[in-house]
Image: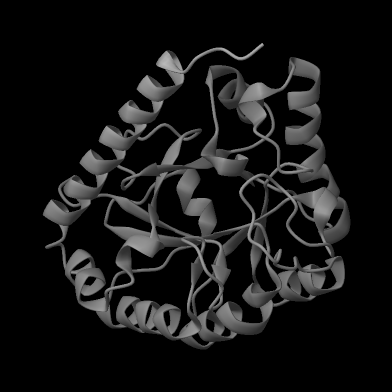
Amino acid sequence: MAGAQLDILMYHSISDDPGPTSISPRVFGEQMQALAESGLPVVSPDAMAKPPLTRSVVITFDDGFTDFDSVAWPIMRDLGFTPIVYLPSGLMGQSENWVGCNTPPRPLMGWDRVEKLAAEGVVFGAHSITHPDLSTLSPTALDHEVFRSGQDIAARLGQPVRHFAPPYGATSAAVQQCVARHYATSVGTRLGVAKLNADLYDLPRLEMFYFTDIARWKSHLSGRGNAYLATRQALRRIRSTAMRSIEKFAPTRH
Protein backbone atom coordinates (compact mmCIF):
# COMPACT_ATOMS: atom_id res chain seq x y z
CA MET A 1 0.00 0.00 0.00
CA ALA A 2 1.41 3.40 -1.01
CA GLY A 3 2.72 5.37 1.95
CA ALA A 4 2.71 2.40 4.30
CA GLN A 5 5.72 2.74 6.59
CA LEU A 6 6.69 2.89 10.23
CA ASP A 7 8.99 5.71 11.33
CA ILE A 8 10.75 4.35 14.44
CA LEU A 9 12.37 7.28 16.23
CA MET A 10 15.56 6.58 18.21
CA TYR A 11 16.52 8.57 21.29
CA HIS A 12 18.91 8.01 24.19
CA SER A 13 19.32 10.93 26.62
CA ILE A 14 17.25 14.13 26.68
CA SER A 15 19.77 16.49 28.21
CA ASP A 16 22.34 19.16 27.42
CA ASP A 17 25.17 16.64 27.77
CA PRO A 18 27.62 16.50 24.85
CA GLY A 19 27.57 13.91 22.09
CA PRO A 20 25.13 12.53 19.52
CA THR A 21 23.23 10.39 22.03
CA SER A 22 22.04 13.50 23.88
CA ILE A 23 19.37 15.88 22.57
CA SER A 24 18.54 19.05 24.45
CA PRO A 25 15.18 19.28 26.23
CA ARG A 26 14.28 22.33 24.14
CA VAL A 27 14.90 20.55 20.84
CA PHE A 28 13.13 17.39 22.03
CA GLY A 29 10.08 19.41 23.00
CA GLU A 30 10.05 21.04 19.56
CA GLN A 31 10.39 17.66 17.86
CA MET A 32 7.48 16.22 19.82
CA GLN A 33 5.29 19.28 19.22
CA ALA A 34 6.00 19.11 15.49
CA LEU A 35 5.11 15.42 15.53
CA ALA A 36 1.83 16.17 17.28
CA GLU A 37 1.00 18.92 14.78
CA SER A 38 1.83 16.66 11.80
CA GLY A 39 -1.23 14.51 12.39
CA LEU A 40 0.76 11.30 11.94
CA PRO A 41 -0.45 8.62 14.36
CA VAL A 42 1.97 7.73 17.15
CA VAL A 43 1.21 4.07 17.73
CA SER A 44 1.92 1.49 20.39
CA PRO A 45 5.35 -0.19 20.22
CA ASP A 46 3.48 -3.45 19.62
CA ALA A 47 2.75 -2.10 16.12
CA MET A 48 6.36 -2.95 15.27
CA ALA A 49 5.39 -6.63 15.20
CA LYS A 50 2.79 -5.92 12.50
CA PRO A 51 3.44 -2.58 10.81
CA PRO A 52 0.23 -0.66 10.09
CA LEU A 53 -1.00 -0.13 6.53
CA THR A 54 -0.66 3.65 6.80
CA ARG A 55 2.32 5.76 7.79
CA SER A 56 2.74 5.73 11.57
CA VAL A 57 5.36 6.57 14.20
CA VAL A 58 6.85 4.69 17.16
CA ILE A 59 9.04 6.50 19.71
CA THR A 60 11.93 4.51 21.22
CA PHE A 61 14.60 5.23 23.85
CA ASP A 62 17.71 3.18 24.56
CA ASP A 63 19.35 2.71 27.97
CA GLY A 64 16.80 4.19 30.42
CA PHE A 65 18.58 7.36 31.51
CA THR A 66 17.04 9.25 34.44
CA ASP A 67 16.22 12.20 32.19
CA PHE A 68 13.65 10.03 30.42
CA ASP A 69 11.62 10.11 33.64
CA SER A 70 12.27 13.73 34.55
CA VAL A 71 12.28 15.39 31.12
CA ALA A 72 11.10 13.28 28.19
CA TRP A 73 8.12 11.43 29.65
CA PRO A 74 6.22 14.51 30.95
CA ILE A 75 6.36 16.02 27.44
CA MET A 76 5.14 12.84 25.74
CA ARG A 77 2.53 12.11 28.40
CA ASP A 78 0.96 15.54 27.90
CA LEU A 79 0.80 14.88 24.14
CA GLY A 80 -0.69 11.41 24.59
CA PHE A 81 2.34 9.55 23.18
CA THR A 82 3.28 6.04 24.37
CA PRO A 83 7.03 5.32 23.98
CA ILE A 84 9.13 2.23 24.59
CA VAL A 85 12.36 2.28 26.64
CA TYR A 86 14.94 -0.51 26.18
CA LEU A 87 16.69 -1.32 29.48
CA PRO A 88 20.07 -2.95 30.25
CA SER A 89 18.54 -4.86 33.14
CA GLY A 90 21.70 -5.47 35.16
CA LEU A 91 22.64 -1.79 35.34
CA MET A 92 19.44 -0.12 36.54
CA GLY A 93 20.04 2.40 39.32
CA GLN A 94 23.71 2.72 38.28
CA SER A 95 25.41 4.86 35.62
CA GLU A 96 26.40 4.03 32.07
CA ASN A 97 29.70 2.14 32.07
CA TRP A 98 30.00 0.69 28.58
CA VAL A 99 32.35 1.37 25.69
CA GLY A 100 31.61 4.77 24.21
CA CYS A 101 29.67 6.12 27.19
CA ASN A 102 29.76 9.79 28.16
CA THR A 103 32.20 11.38 30.58
CA PRO A 104 31.02 11.97 33.21
CA PRO A 105 28.70 8.97 32.91
CA ARG A 106 24.96 9.60 32.83
CA PRO A 107 22.77 7.95 35.51
CA LEU A 108 20.20 5.26 34.71
CA MET A 109 16.77 4.98 36.29
CA GLY A 110 16.26 2.72 39.28
CA TRP A 111 13.65 -0.02 39.29
CA ASP A 112 11.30 2.06 41.44
CA ARG A 113 11.06 4.67 38.68
CA VAL A 114 10.69 2.00 36.00
CA GLU A 115 7.80 0.42 37.89
CA LYS A 116 6.12 3.82 38.33
CA LEU A 117 6.46 4.63 34.64
CA ALA A 118 5.11 1.23 33.61
CA ALA A 119 2.05 1.91 35.74
CA GLU A 120 1.61 5.19 33.84
CA GLY A 121 1.68 3.44 30.46
CA VAL A 122 5.33 3.46 29.36
CA VAL A 123 6.34 0.25 27.58
CA PHE A 124 9.70 -1.37 28.39
CA GLY A 125 11.87 -3.59 26.22
CA ALA A 126 15.10 -5.49 26.79
CA HIS A 127 18.55 -4.12 25.94
CA SER A 128 20.72 -6.98 27.31
CA ILE A 129 21.95 -7.28 30.90
CA THR A 130 25.34 -5.55 30.79
CA HIS A 131 25.27 -3.66 27.44
CA PRO A 132 27.93 -5.73 25.58
CA ASP A 133 28.48 -6.07 21.84
CA LEU A 134 26.31 -9.16 21.41
CA SER A 135 27.94 -10.08 18.09
CA THR A 136 31.19 -10.91 19.93
CA LEU A 137 29.72 -13.33 22.49
CA SER A 138 29.70 -17.11 22.61
CA PRO A 139 26.30 -18.77 21.99
CA THR A 140 25.83 -19.42 25.71
CA ALA A 141 26.73 -15.89 26.78
CA LEU A 142 24.60 -14.44 23.97
CA ASP A 143 21.50 -16.36 25.00
CA HIS A 144 22.03 -15.37 28.63
CA GLU A 145 22.30 -11.65 27.83
CA VAL A 146 19.32 -11.72 25.48
CA PHE A 147 16.91 -13.98 27.37
CA ARG A 148 17.69 -13.02 30.96
CA SER A 149 17.34 -9.30 30.29
CA GLY A 150 13.69 -9.68 29.34
CA GLN A 151 13.07 -12.06 32.21
CA ASP A 152 14.52 -9.56 34.70
CA ILE A 153 12.23 -6.79 33.45
CA ALA A 154 9.17 -9.06 33.29
CA ALA A 155 9.74 -10.16 36.88
CA ARG A 156 9.84 -6.54 38.03
CA LEU A 157 6.82 -5.38 36.06
CA GLY A 158 4.63 -8.48 36.12
CA GLN A 159 4.12 -8.44 32.35
CA PRO A 160 5.85 -10.02 29.37
CA VAL A 161 8.59 -8.21 27.49
CA ARG A 162 8.07 -8.50 23.73
CA HIS A 163 10.70 -6.22 22.21
CA PHE A 164 14.50 -6.09 22.12
CA ALA A 165 17.27 -3.70 21.04
CA PRO A 166 20.88 -4.92 20.79
CA PRO A 167 23.41 -2.51 22.31
CA TYR A 168 25.19 -0.36 19.70
CA GLY A 169 22.87 -1.88 17.11
CA ALA A 170 25.50 -4.63 16.83
CA THR A 171 23.87 -7.64 15.26
CA SER A 172 24.54 -10.74 13.18
CA ALA A 173 22.61 -13.75 11.94
CA ALA A 174 23.32 -15.51 15.24
CA VAL A 175 22.14 -12.50 17.29
CA GLN A 176 18.95 -12.18 15.26
CA GLN A 177 18.19 -15.89 15.55
CA CYS A 178 18.71 -15.75 19.31
CA VAL A 179 16.49 -12.70 19.72
CA ALA A 180 13.79 -14.30 17.55
CA ARG A 181 13.54 -17.19 20.01
CA HIS A 182 12.51 -14.84 22.81
CA TYR A 183 10.98 -11.63 21.39
CA ALA A 184 8.52 -10.38 18.78
CA THR A 185 10.78 -7.66 17.35
CA SER A 186 14.27 -6.18 17.48
CA VAL A 187 15.31 -2.67 16.48
CA GLY A 188 18.80 -1.62 15.46
CA THR A 189 20.66 1.53 14.51
CA ARG A 190 20.42 1.07 10.73
CA LEU A 191 19.13 4.39 9.39
CA GLY A 192 15.79 4.23 7.62
CA VAL A 193 12.06 3.68 7.89
CA ALA A 194 10.37 0.29 8.21
CA LYS A 195 8.30 -0.83 5.23
CA LEU A 196 5.75 -3.63 5.19
CA ASN A 197 8.38 -6.23 4.24
CA ALA A 198 10.86 -5.12 6.94
CA ASP A 199 12.85 -7.74 8.83
CA LEU A 200 11.22 -7.80 12.28
CA TYR A 201 14.59 -8.64 13.87
CA ASP A 202 16.56 -5.83 12.23
CA LEU A 203 14.11 -2.94 12.11
CA PRO A 204 15.66 0.37 11.01
CA ARG A 205 15.25 3.57 13.02
CA LEU A 206 15.57 7.30 12.56
CA GLU A 207 18.40 8.68 14.70
CA MET A 208 16.84 11.89 15.96
CA PHE A 209 20.18 13.66 16.31
CA TYR A 210 19.94 14.06 12.52
CA PHE A 211 16.70 16.02 12.94
CA THR A 212 17.63 18.64 15.52
CA ASP A 213 16.94 21.25 12.81
CA ILE A 214 13.19 21.55 13.32
CA ALA A 215 12.53 22.77 9.78
CA ARG A 216 14.22 19.61 8.48
CA TRP A 217 12.20 17.49 10.90
CA LYS A 218 8.95 19.09 9.78
CA SER A 219 9.95 18.46 6.18
CA HIS A 220 10.45 14.78 6.95
CA LEU A 221 7.11 14.57 8.72
CA SER A 222 5.36 16.13 5.74
CA GLY A 223 6.87 13.55 3.37
CA ARG A 224 9.32 15.97 1.75
CA GLY A 225 12.49 14.76 3.48
CA ASN A 226 13.43 11.78 1.31
CA ALA A 227 16.43 13.47 -0.28
CA TYR A 228 17.93 14.40 3.08
CA LEU A 229 17.41 10.90 4.45
CA ALA A 230 18.96 9.35 1.34
CA THR A 231 21.99 11.63 1.70
CA ARG A 232 22.44 10.63 5.34
CA GLN A 233 22.16 6.95 4.42
CA ALA A 234 24.79 7.36 1.70
CA LEU A 235 27.18 9.15 4.05
CA ARG A 236 26.75 6.35 6.57
CA ARG A 237 27.58 3.73 3.94
CA ILE A 238 30.70 5.64 2.92
CA ARG A 239 31.83 5.97 6.53
CA SER A 240 31.17 2.27 7.19
CA THR A 241 33.14 1.26 4.09
CA ALA A 242 36.03 3.50 5.09
CA MET A 243 36.12 2.06 8.59
CA ARG A 244 36.18 -1.50 7.25
CA SER A 245 39.07 -0.59 4.95
CA ILE A 246 41.03 0.91 7.83
CA GLU A 247 40.48 -2.21 9.93
CA LYS A 248 41.43 -4.50 7.02
CA PHE A 249 44.73 -2.78 6.32
CA ALA A 250 45.67 -1.82 9.87
CA PRO A 251 48.93 -3.49 10.98
CA THR A 252 48.48 -6.45 13.29
CA ARG A 253 49.90 -5.90 16.74
CA HIS A 254 51.60 -8.67 18.63
89 sits left or right of 10 in the view: right
Q: In the image, what residue occupies the spot 52% across and 56% down?
A: 45
Assign the N terminus to one quadrant of the image: top left
Residue 117 percent coordinates (x, y): 72, 74
**Which residue does the image show at 82% across and 59% down from the upper left?**
92
Q: Looking at the picture, does residue 60 appear above or below residue 122?
A: above
Residue at point 36%, 35% (across, down): 198
In the rendered picture of this protein, how many numbered marks are placed on residues? 0
- Towards the viewer: 179 or 109: 109
- List x then y, in percent, for residue 207: 40, 56
In-image side of 161 versus 29 (left or right): right
The reply to whether residue 165 is in sight is: no
Q: Quadrant of residue 102?
A: bottom right
110 up-or-down from 10: above or below: below
**Apparent side of residue 41 relative to residue 43 in the rendered image (left or right):** left
Q: Write down the quadrant of residue 177 in the picture.
A: top right
What percent of the width, then of the height, locates residue 50?
A: 44, 44
